[in-house]
Amino acid sequence: MTELKQTYLVGPNIHLRAVEESDAASEPSWRQSWFPRARAVSEAKIEDDHAGRETTLLAVRNKDDVVVGSVTIETEGTWAFVTPFAARWLTGEQADALMAEIATLVLPFLVDEGGNIAALVEVPAELPALDAAMSDIGARFCYRQRGAMVYRGVRCDRVGWQYFNRKTLDVFGMPKLTPEGLVEREITNPALSDWPVVDTPPTGALVVGERLYLRMLTPEDGAVIRDASLTETEFAHDPRFPRSAMVMNARFRKSSEAEPPVNPTFAIVLRENDELIGRNELDYLDLVHRSAETGTILLKAEHRGKGHGTEAKHLLLRYAFEVLNLHMVWSIVWQQNPRSRAALLRQGYREAGCIPWGGTHHGIPSGDWVFDYLASEWQAARR
C-alpha cells in the first residue's frame, strides 16, 4: 500500500490527480481516444495536449498508484460538463464501478466546493453501479439519446445526469425536467423520397435540393456573414454580436484542415441565384460512434419562415446518413428558443429530455432541450 498524501478528491478505491509528463507512459489507460499513440508521440505532445481550457484528471488506484482511467472536465460560465473514462483492460463490471466512483467524487467537488450551479455527466446507459451512484448523491436523470455511442463493442444509448447546487436550488427551486418524447411520432415535414435530378450541379455543390444546395464555404462567404450579423433582428442563444469576416473565414478554414474534420460546416445557397442564405453544421462528428450534432442558421429574417431551414436540414441529414453513414444525429436548443424546438419536432427529431441548467441568463439558471434522430427513422419517414 503506497502512502497517499492527497487530502481531497479521494474515494474508497481511487483518487483523482492532475496529469504529469511522466503519465505519457500509461496514456493508453487514461487518454480518451480510440487511437493509441507511439510512446515518443505521447511524450512529445502531452504538454500541449493539456494546455487548453479542458481539464483532465487521472483516476489512480489508492492501493498501488496504478492509473485506471480519467475524467475530462469542461467548464463554461457557471456550469461544468464531465466525461469519465475507464481503462479498456478493465472488465465491464470494474469499469462501471470505476466510473461511478469518479462521478461521485467530481460532481459534488465541482458544485459544492467549486461553486458551479450544476455539473452534467454523460455516460453509456444501463450501467447499474453508475446509475445507483448518481441517485445516491442526488443527481437527476435528464436525457437519453438513443444509439448515440458504442461502448465496449456494443451500440447503446447515451444518457445525461445533472447534479445541482443546493444553494441555487434554495433560491430558484428544482428545475422542471422534460420527459422523453415518443418513439412513434408524427413527422410533418419529412424529406423527399426522390431527390431532384441534376444534370449540371452548381459549382461546388455537395447535395442539391428543390430550392437549395449545400457547398463548402469560400473566402467570399465571410463578408456575407459579417454583413448579416450587423443587421440581425433576432436574439437566439447568444447575444447579437458583430462578426469579423477574417475570423469567420479562419474558423471555416481551420475546421476543414483536419482529416476527417470534427465540425464540418456547409454553406446554404439558393439555387435560383446562388445567394448564400445561411450555414449548417455537423458538430462533434464521430465516425466511430457514427453520430454528430446538427445545427442550422439562416442569416436574414427574410429567409426565415419559408421552409428554407427545413430543406437545408434535410440536405444536411442526407449527407450525414447517406454519405457519412451516420447512425444517428442529435441537437440541443436553448429553452428560450421555442421556434427552433418546434422546427426540429416537425422535421422528425424526438425530444430526448433536457439539460435543466446549462448556464444563466440575466442571472437566472437557464436550460436546453435535447433531441435525437435515428437514420432509420429519417429514411422511413421520407415522402
Image (cartoon, grey):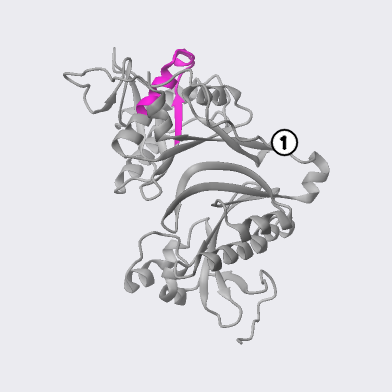
Q: Is residue 309 magenta?
A: yes
Does 139 sit above or below residue 249?
below
Q: Position of residue 222 (x, y in %)?
A: 36, 30
Percent coordinates x, y for residue 204 in the rendering = 23, 28
- Could you tell me which secondary element the residue under label 1 belongs to? loop
Q: Residue at x 66, y 35 (%)?
A: 178
Q: Quadrant of the C terminus?
A: top left
> Label 1 sits on what residue type?
Lys
Q: Quadrant of the N terminus?
A: bottom right
The residue at 60%/86% (across/down) is: 2
**Picture quadrant of residue 279:** top left
Question: Which of the pair 210/21 is nearer the observer?
Answer: 210
| Residue displayed at 41% across by 24% down | 381
Q: Quadrant of residue 215?
A: top left
Vertical arrangement, residue 17 with respect to residue 250, above or below: below
Locate residue 226, reporting x and y percent. Answer: 42, 27
Please report the bounds of the magenta region as a residue range: 294-316
Up-down relation of residue 331 to residue 133 (above or below): above
Residue 57 seen anywhere in this rendered image of the structure: no
What is the number of callouts on the image? Answer: 1
Q: Residue 325 colored magenta?
A: no
